């Protein structure tokens, strides 16, 4: 039996996971311990942060553009009718998540909150199990061997 989408809950969205990560990072930074990385000059930190944010948002924009071009929803909870494997999807099966992770790293540097950088690893693990695995199973159910072939040929992240 085919499901109409991979995610059914608001908690199974990148938005919810990002907000929780941001909240935890601010609490840890302000009230627990402020992580300092040995004297990174502010200008270098900002350049690195802005570069990461730019690259992350560029990847997200390119992925959303491909979804729009193919008339497919990019948000969770909506049925997918067509497999998108063009544009950035030729290089990454999950460019939206990749873009989010890169953007969060950039925000961590830009706002001098290195907890964001540290929390990227647990966030990536949660995204993997709570979002990517159900999405891949949904797409295998919907597209069968075409999606299985895509899984073999395109890496998850890069």
Image (spheres, rainbow, N blue to C red):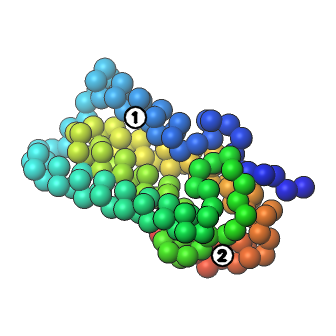
x%, y% of residue 50? 23, 53
Query: Is residue 92 visible to us here?
Result: no
Name the spot of residue 3 as percent of width and height, x first: 81, 52
Left or right of 26 in this view: 64: right
Compared across the picture, whether 63 is left or right of 153 comes to: left
Farthest residue, direction right: 1
Relative to 115, say whether 75 is above or below: below
- Mark 1, Cα crowd under 10 Å, few <14 / some 14-19 / many 20+, is some
* Secondary structure beneath label 2: helix
Query: What residue is disc 2 on?
Result: 150
Query: Neighbour class for label 2 at 10 Å: few (<14), some, many (≥20)?
Result: some
Kindly give the residue lying farthest to the top in the view shown: 31
Image spot of residue 79 (x, y percent):
72, 54
**The one of 89 and 66 positioned closer to us in this rendering:** 66
Q: Specify the quadrant of the image occupied by residue 59.
A: bottom left
Residue 3, compared with residue 58, is above or below; it is above
User: x, y percentage for residue 28?
Assistant: 35, 27
- Which residue sits at x=35%, y=41%? 116
Q: Earlier in the sequence, mark 1 or mark 2?
A: 1
Q: Which residue is mark 1?
A: 22
Quarter of the image with the N terminus is bottom right
Q: Nearer the viewer, residue 154 or 5?
A: 5
Callout 1 secondary element? helix
Rendered position, 17 above or below 47: above
């Amino acid at each position: 039996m085919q499901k109409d989408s991979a995610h059914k809950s608001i908690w199974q969205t990148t938005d919810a996971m990002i907000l929780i990560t941001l909240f935890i990072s601010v609490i840890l930074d302000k009230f627990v311990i402020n992580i300092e990385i040995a004297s990174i000059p502010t200008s270098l930190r900002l350049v690195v942060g802005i570069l990461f944010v730019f690259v992350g948002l560029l990847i997200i924009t390119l992925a959303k553009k491909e979804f729009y071009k193919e008339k497919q929803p990019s948000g969770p909870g909506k049925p997918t009718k067509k497999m998108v494997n063009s544009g950035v999807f030729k290089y990454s099966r999950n460019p939206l998540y990749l873009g989010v992770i890169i953007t969060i790293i950039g925000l961590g540097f830009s706002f001098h909150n290195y907890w964001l950088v540290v929390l990227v690893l647990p966030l990536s693990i949660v995204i993997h199990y709570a979002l990517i695995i159900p999405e891949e199973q949904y797409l295998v159910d919907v597209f069968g061997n075409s999606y299985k072939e895509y899984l073999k040929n395109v890496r998850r992240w890069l």
